[in-house]
Amino acid sequence: MKAVCWQGTHEVRVEEVPEPRLHNQHDALVKITLTAICGSDLHLYDGFVPTMRKGDILGHEFMGEVVEVGREVYNLKKGDRVVVPFTISCGRCFFCKRDLWSLCENSNPNGASAAKMYGFPTAGLFGYSHLFGGFAGGQAQYARVPFADVGPILIPPEISDEQALFLSDIFPTGYMAAENCAIQPGDTVAVWGCGPVGQFAIRSAFLLGAERVIALDDVNGRLEMAKAAKAETLNFDDIDVVEKLKELTGGRGPDSCIDAVGMEAHGAALDALYDRAKQAARLETDRPHVLRQAIQACRPGGTVSIPGVYTGLIDKFPIGAAFAKGLTLKMGQTHVPKYMKSLLGLVQRGEIDPSFVITHRFALGSAPDAYKQFRYDRSSCIKVVLNPS
């Protein structure tokens, strides 16, 4: 089969690889009908996530048709159309039973390596390095889905692939980011980063009752998409972000701040240049410029929600400001199965059409060009989908 394989920093190739097979009786095989490139994939593309190996199959946002199931998979059958969550979860452990699916104790075969880095293992993830299990991803013609009796969700025929696909990651991720803010009626929420997750966080904040959402980015196309959702927009290149947000909120600051950027934040401020220099010298793994702004801007007693991916160590973290203001910080990989059914309901009722975020479509065989466009065309390329057929 054809699959998108990581070859090193800024290099992916479409290669012929063996088709996957069932490994145990809880597995399913899925023929991929649509997959996507996630902003998190760019962290792999840029070489910032450790334990990647040449030939690793990329991709953690995918859906398709079930072609084979193990004997212990009773909820799926051949021909079913499913979306697969990017987190791999057993459904039976301490954390899965508490809806903390991305903390599954049983799905990461390399959990000991993750524990050395983070203190405890985390769930396995599709196509996201050997630190998270080394599982083959979904930017391919077929994928093996472990614990298929737990994760995938059936998609009704009236919902198109493009409407359903983002239940795999970015829709639940944006929604969980907003839910973590514990939004109250009348709240103002600021969202840094108007890429795909930021766009869903904006819309989710409104769905959860926010009165105002202020969206920050430096790309006009992304800001225009945020405006279409009734967000107020700010280009962070033109302003002192913290002072402007105070001005817009009567001097108090937003009730909640969402960092939908993560480890590759950029900017022209002194601390952003400092981060870039330290990261280049391997003295810091992540660039927390946005996270610092969010902590400084958030009102006392507010919440900073962090769906943007961070992988290691950061410098100059303003813990004093967070402590003095009594902030709540909530973060983590998304507990996708917790949200899939309810968010599918929103799509079915016409309350949101997740396909709004798609700006570019490519055949799977054009994945190297798609990665380049997604990485470098920041002006117009917001979300890329790949069609294996």
Image (cartoon, rainbow, N blue to C red):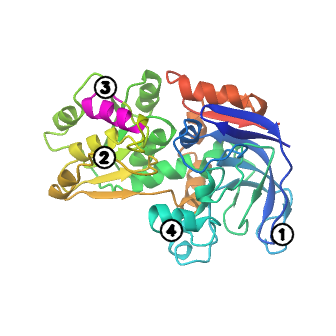
* Circle nearer the N terminus (4, 2): 4
From mark 3 to mark 1, how far is it between C-alphas?
53 Å
Residue position for label 2: 315
In the rendering, which numbered label is found on residue 70? 1
Q: Nearer the viewer, residue 181 or 297?
A: 297
Q: Nearer the viewer, residue 284 or 241?
A: 284
Residue 342 covered by magenta stretch? no
* Circle nearer the N terminus (4, 3): 4
Q: Which marked residue is nearer to the observer: mark 3 or mark 1?
A: 3
Q: Residue at x 62, y 26 (%)?
A: 372
The answer to whether 103 appears left or right of 130 in the picture is left
Instruction: Please state which amino acid type lies under the numbered disc 4.
Output: Leu
Q: Is residue 358 above or below residue 168?
A: above
* Circle nearer the N terminus (1, 4): 1
* Circle nearer the N terminus (3, 2): 3
Helix, strand or loop at label 3? It is loop
Q: Which marked residue is nearer to the observer: mark 4 or mark 2?
A: 2
The image shows residue 204 at horizontal and vertical percentages of: 44, 47
Magenta residues span 267-279
The answer to whether 123 appears left or right of 178 in the picture is right
CB atoms of marks 3 and 2 within 8 Å: no
Q: Nearer the viewer, residue 179 or 144?
A: 144
Q: Residue at x 61, y 37 (%)?
A: 355
The image shows residue 110 at horizontal and vertical percentages of: 62, 64
In the rendering, which numbered label is found on residue 268? 3
- Per the picture, the main secondary structure of the magenta-coloured stretch is helix
Helix, strand or loop at label 1? It is loop
CB atoms of marks 1 and 4 within 8 Å: no
Residue position for label 4: 100
Q: Residue at x 63, y 30 (%)?
A: 371
From mark 4 to mark 2, how far is it between C-alphas?
28 Å
